[in-house]
Image (cartoon, rainbow, N blue to C red):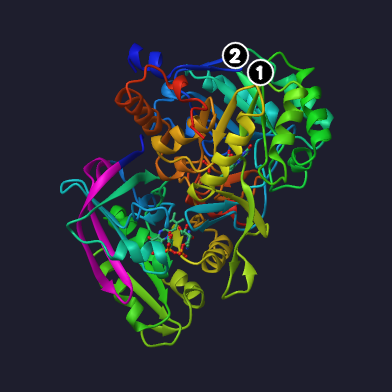
């Protein structure tokens, strides 16, 4: 990447300096290393790693994904090696790359979130993203993500246990996304990311059985984009902290829509499965758009939708 | 070895059985590296539905011609899209993905059922000049076009069909003990329905013959990033079928 690129695309979100505003969404990009044959990790805005818990988790039984119109359902169930394994064997391998690493965390209790944040308060982690929105496991945080008081308690606990920037990832499975956003901002969130997946279900009409082993799962991909754009727009105008927009981004055009709605950065998720270089193609396309529109920096797009 | 994503020109996409087609792609970078047991992850259409790639085993690779092939059954929307493509088209293809079979021993027996025979075809070629035999099963005679394809790669072909229209009536597992007694096999490679592979692994264990199985799981990324495809390993840890497999030693993933 030339100097000019980062001049045009470089952003700082909650103190995390990124070369482009395009991050990779948690759970869709492994720990980053899995993608190293396909993308130059040094050219990604930030890598948000798979949801990490205090103890290792083996995830859900049975079939975990199902394709749906313009999207997919997943019920991985937060399979992950646990925070200690992450710190001892995965993080050291990420040190070879010049890319901010943000760790997505999930706990069963407020204290667990705090404990996770404390253990991850190390130099090579750029920030933590609180997953209070996983629809796939009972303990995966959704209970925290659908109630303003408990969301706020989690954020406060984490903030008091870390010096790192704290991003709070919101669930779209709520009635009032703005109220949730305001509670976590009041509790000290440094940035807000949204949306996590929408709770969905698929049924096999020949077997009369749910397609997923877990019965229900989270919907992601292009199908959710209009909902995500709407929620980003609602939240961005109601809070002061930066918003990271995601949900169905496949192309630069999709990402630009999120920025115009008010996002200060974006993340690509499901698109990584279709195009392992998606984070690059989206960033490259954004740069072209900025040039074509005669703008000088991607920041000039933020929240510029004219009502 | 690096994995790649390439826009591969279709050399041909021809029917070789009822609802079964062979797709030959010009992808020299993939052909140069592919080993038996590995798979391609194919974007069957530039669309949002189907959205995800489809995993398909490599059934042959020709380094000189720069081609890789896959043999697939049309079962749903994605494979129907693929079946509609012709030699004027190209497809976006990732590969070669996963770990292949470990070449082991001197006297291999292949056991395959249904589309599981596709990767074994590539393997049979790679096992030359070892005296290789294959035990293959299908529902009916029409499905057993495979026999011709293995003809010049195997020393003996044992066939079972569910309805007895070709070879012996029954399933591969019925004939397996008899085949094992007929030769001093020192390794078994199996690919096909899970039930069949579990049965083969069990028999292999009683005969004390090392056995490799090639698993199938629903996949999104194909490269270890999403954990859609994991299965329980005998060591208590989860295994990613896409990157730890799809080929495993039977005892790694089966009791
Ligand atoms: C490593 C590996 C190698 C394979 N090799 C071959 C091969 O050589 N020849 C062949 O005919 N088939 C092979 N398959 C199965 C093949 O991937 C499916 O038949 C195909 O994805 C079906 O797609 P569809 O859209 O036509 O069917 P649909 O049923 O409409 O597919 C819906 C979704 O389910 C997935 N899916 C459906 N069936 C399977 C399956 N059996 N395994 C994994 N995912 C599935 C699809 O990828 C898609 O995401 C292989 C699968 C794996 C995992
Ligand atoms: C397979 C899969 C696994 C995911 N795992 C996590 C996770 O561990 N933690 C989390 O916060 N979000 C997780 N997500 C949600 C994504 O990070 C993202 O918020 C969502 O998929 C919407 O973006 P997309 O439509 O671009 O995929 C996962 C999504 C998918 C598809
Ligand atoms: S398919 Fe994504 S980890 Fe195996």
Which badge, 2 or 1, is on the more N-terminal residue?
2
Looking at the image, which is closer to me, B38 or A187?
A: A187
Quarter holding residue A179: top right
Magenta stretch bounds:
B6-32
Quarter holding residue B77: bottom left
- Mark number, residue A15: 2
Q: Is residue A138 left or right of residue B35?
A: right
Q: Secondary structure at mark 2?
A: loop
| Residue A106 in view here | no
Q: Can you say which quadrant of the picture contains the C terminus of chain B?
A: bottom right
- Mark number, residue A38: none
Q: Is mark 1 within 8 Å of ligand 2?
A: no
Whether B165 is drawn above or below A17: the answer is below
Q: What residue would you read off at disc 1? A: A165
Q: Is residue A239 left or right of residue B70?
A: right
Whether A63 is drawn above or below A103: the answer is below
Q: Is residue B112 left or right of residue A267?
A: left
| Residue depicted at x 57% and y 60% | B205
Query: How far from the left and from the top, in percent, is residue B216?
Result: 49, 57
Query: How far from the left and from the top, in percent, is residue A143?
Result: 79, 42
Q: Residues within 10 Å of mark 2 (few under 14, many from 20)?
A: few
| Residue depicted at x 56% and y 22% | A101
Looking at the image, which is closer to me, A79 or A200?
A: A200
| Residue depicted at x 35% and y 31% | A285
Query: How far from the left and from the top, in percent, is residue B152?
Result: 23, 66
Q: Are marks 2 and 1 in contact (CB under 8 Å)?
A: yes
Quarter holding residue A146: top right
């Amino acid at each position: 990447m030339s100097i000019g690129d980062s001049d045009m695309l470089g952003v700082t979100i909650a103190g995390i300096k990124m070369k482009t505003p395009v991050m990779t969404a948690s759970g869709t990009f492994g720990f980053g290393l899995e993608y190293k044959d396909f993308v130059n990790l040094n050219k990604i805005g930030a890598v948000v790693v798979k949801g990490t818990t205090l103890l290792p988790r083996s995830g859900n039984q049975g079939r975990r994904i199902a394709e749906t119109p313009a999207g997919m359902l997943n019920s991985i169930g937060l399979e992950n090696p646990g925070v200690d394994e992450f710190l001892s064997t995965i993080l050291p391998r990420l040190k070879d790359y010049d890319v901010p690493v943000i760790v997505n965390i999930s706990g069963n209790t407020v204290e667990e979130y705090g404990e996770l944040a404390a253990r991850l308060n190390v130099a090579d982690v750029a920030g933590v993203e609180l997953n209070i929105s996983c629809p796939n496991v009972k303990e995966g945080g959704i209970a925290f993500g659908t109630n303003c008081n408990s969301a706020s308690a989690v954020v406060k606990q984490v903030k008091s246990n870390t010096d790192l920037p704290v991003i709070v990832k919101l669930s779209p499975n709520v009635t009032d996304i703005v109220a949730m956003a305001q509670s976590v901002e009041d509790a000290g969130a440094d940035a807000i990311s949204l949306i996590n997946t929408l709770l969905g279900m698929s049924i096999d009409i020949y077997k009369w059985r749910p397609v997923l082993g877990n019965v229900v799962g989270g919907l992601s991909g292009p199908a959710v984009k209009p909902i995500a754009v709407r929620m980003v727009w609602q939240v961005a105008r109601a809070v002061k902290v930066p918003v990271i927009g995601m949900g169905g981004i496949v192309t630069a055009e999709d990402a630009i829509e999120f920025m115009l709605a008010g996002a200060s950065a974006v993340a690509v998720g499901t698109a990584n499965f279709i195009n392992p270089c998606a984070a690059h193609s989206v960033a490259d396309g954004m740069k072209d758009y900025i040039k074509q529109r005669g703008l000088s920096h991607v920041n000039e797009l933020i929240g510029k939708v004219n009502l | 070895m690096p994995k790649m994503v390439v826009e591969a020109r279709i050399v041909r996409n021809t029917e070789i059985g009822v609802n079964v087609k062979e797709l030959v792609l010009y992808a020299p970078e993939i052909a140069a590296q592919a080993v038996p047991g590995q798979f391609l992850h194919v974007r069957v259409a530039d669309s949002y539905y189907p959205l995800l790639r489809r995993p398909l085993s490599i059934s042959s690779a020709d380094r000189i011609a720069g081609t890789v092939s896959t043999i697939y059954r049309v079962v749903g929307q994605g494979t129907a899209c693929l079946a509609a493509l012709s030699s004027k088209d190209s497809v976006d293809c990732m590969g070669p993905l996963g770990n292949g079979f470990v070449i082991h021993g001197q006297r291999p027996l292949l056991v395959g059922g249904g589309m599981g025979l596709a990767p074994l075809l590539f393997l049979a070629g790679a096992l030359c000049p070892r005296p290789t035999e294959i035990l293959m099963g299908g529902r009916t005679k029409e499905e057993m076009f495979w026999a011709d394809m293995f003809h010049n790669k195997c020393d003996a072909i044992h066939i079972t069909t569910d309805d007895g229209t070709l070879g012996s009536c029954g399933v591969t597992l019925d004939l397996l003990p008899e085949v094992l007694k007929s030769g001093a096999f020192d390794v078994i490679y199996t690919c096909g329905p899970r039930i069949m592979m579990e049965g083969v692994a069990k028999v292999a264990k009683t005969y004390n013959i090392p056995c490799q199985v090639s698993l199938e799981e629903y996949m999104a990324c194909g490269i270890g990033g999403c954990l859609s495809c994991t299965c329980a390993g005998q060591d208590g840890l989860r295994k990613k079928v896409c990157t730890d497999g799809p080929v495993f030693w039977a005892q790694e993933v089966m009791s």
